[in-house]
Image (cartoon, grey):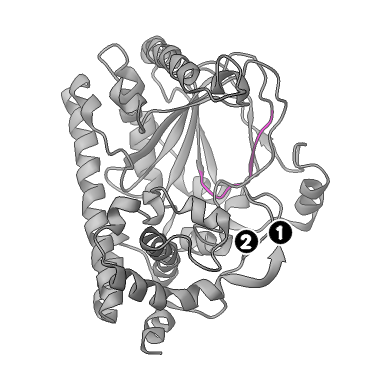
């Protein structure tokens, strides 16, 4: 495994890793993914809707994307395509991710692949990969990263030479500058000052911290097969049927990560039950189990995540719910384990009255996360909304949240 400069990574927000995939394994990984691409193309044909081109999403999307951790692809990993999953265990990917996160054994959270479109779609928009409407304002992420390091690191690992990705070093721990906002409002699809283009040879990787401002500069028909996904302390891969085709070590790793996720789900239930029972000590203890080594800023970010998860539980019992924007309601329907939202099945652990009590406790925090009028900040994957893009509630702590249960 390569030696890395974690302090520089934390400062700049990204790191280029040469030979993330060992050269002697690159061809096997290419073959495995191409087989999966061929299979998925057939799925997209079968899934096309009325008015879609014959190839469905493969022909219409500016970036056709395979989702290996979600059906149906999770069920088609075979011995032939096992390298597509096992690549995530490479020392220069898994080992480096563990170092960057500051943990002993990082978990693959998602496994994907980004492909080229069949026609030229040009550049995408500069953006940050998080949505304040269903996660947290940018300041919450910044404070948490500065306090305890990132909770999640994301990878682009092209199987062929690739220079599509640009990043703004250091933008993961600050708001947009005035100059950046002017550029983004004028044209979000142009190079930004201080932008750095990543030049990657096949098998190299770039790993970055999620809120960083970045850009997909050219979605052209040129062959592109970029392994994409990330690591955190737990996984979002529920269907482990494919691991029987992996090596013993790789299969054990996926099972270990899955067990850890189930444990975090149990801790999440403990957190919510502490809220229902107005037990502040139990709430803090469970938060510390969910995210060890985090301080007050980290606990507050987790509390904001739990606020959104509590709303998801409430919506699962009674949807629609008054005053909940359609975009937020839509985003909360699925699972997003990185932010402690475990999906509709998890909501089944709570009765209707418990769900109502949970939301009653969290709703005052939700109000603090909203502005009086719709507003917009460029560089986010959202349009105008009433939820704050940047700022967290001023002078608000987890103690304030707990104290509010009595009101």
Residue 216 belongs to magenta span: yes
Q: Which mark is residue 376?
A: 1
Q: CA distance from mark 2 to mark 1?
A: 8 Å
Q: Is residue 81 visible from the viewing direction of this image?
A: yes
* Name of the residue lying farthest toward the front: 50
Q: Residue furthest bottom?
A: 407
> Where 16 falls versus 406 (above or below)?
above
- Residue at (69%, 26%) from the top-left corner? 218
**Residue 161 in picture, x, y percent from top left:** 57, 17
Which residue does the image show at 31% across and 67% down from the upper left? 287
Q: Is residue 401 above or below residue 85?
A: below
Q: Residue 112 versus residue 361: which sits nearer the camera?
A: 361
Q: Which residue is mark 2?
A: 389
The residue sitting at 48% across, 20% down in the picture is 44
Q: Look at the image and give the residue range highlighted in magenta.
A: 209-217
Check disc 2 and report its element: helix, strand or loop.
loop
Q: Marks 2 and 1: CB-CB under 8 Å? A: yes
Q: Is residue 190 above or below residue 186?
A: above
Q: Quadrant of the C terminus?
A: bottom left
């Amino acid at each position: 495994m390569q030696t890395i400069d974690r302090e520089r990574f934390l400062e700049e927000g990204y790191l280029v890793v040469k030979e993330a995939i060992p050269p002697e394994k690159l061809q096997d990984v290419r073959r495995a993914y191409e087989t999966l691409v061929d299979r998925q193309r057939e799925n997209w044909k079968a899934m096309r809707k009325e008015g879609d081109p014959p190839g469905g999403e493969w022909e219409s999307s500016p970036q056709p994307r395979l989702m290996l951790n979600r059906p149906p692809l999770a069920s088609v990993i075979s011995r032939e395509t096992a390298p597509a999953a096992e690549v995530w265990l490479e020392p220069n990917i898994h080992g480096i991710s563990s170092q960057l996160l500051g943990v002993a054994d990082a978990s693959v959270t998602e496994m994907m692949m980004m492909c080229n479109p069949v026609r030229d779609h040009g550049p995408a928009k500069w953006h940050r990969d998080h949505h304040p409407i269903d996660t947290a304002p940018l300041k919450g992420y910044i404070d948490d990263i500065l306090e305890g390091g990132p909770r999640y690191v994301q990878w682009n690992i092209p199987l062929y030479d690739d220079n599509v990705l640009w990043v703004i070093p250091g933008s993961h721990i600050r708001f947009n500058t005035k100059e950046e906002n002017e550029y983004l409002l004028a044209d979000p699809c142009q190079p930004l000052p201080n932008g750095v283009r990543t030049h990657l040879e096949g098998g190299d990787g770039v790993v970055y911290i999620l809120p960083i401002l970045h850009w997909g500069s050219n979605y052209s028909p040129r062959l592109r097969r970029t392994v994409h996904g990330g690591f955190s302390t737990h996984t979002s891969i529920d269907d482990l049927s494919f691991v029987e085709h992996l090596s013993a070590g790789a299969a054990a790793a996926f099972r270990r990560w899955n067990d850890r996720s189930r444990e975090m789900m149990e801790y999440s239930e403990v957190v919510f039950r502490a809220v229902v029972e107005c037990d502040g000590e139990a709430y803090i203890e469970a938060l510390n189990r969910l995210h060890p080594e985090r301080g007050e800023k980290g606990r507050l970010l987790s509390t904001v995540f739990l606020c959104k998860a509590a709303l998801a539980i409430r919506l699962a019992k009674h949807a629609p719910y008054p005053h909940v924007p359609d975009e937020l309601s839509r985003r909360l329907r699925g699972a997003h384990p990185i932010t402690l939202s475990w999906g509709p099945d998890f909501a089944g652990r709570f009765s209707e009255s418990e769900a109502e009590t949970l939301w009653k406790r969290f709703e005052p925090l939700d109000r603090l996360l909203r502005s009086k009028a719709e507003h917009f900040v460029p560089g986010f994957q959202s349009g105008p909304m009433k939820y704050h893009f940047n700022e967290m509630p001023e002078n608000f702590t987890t103690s304030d949240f707990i104290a509010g249960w009595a009101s």
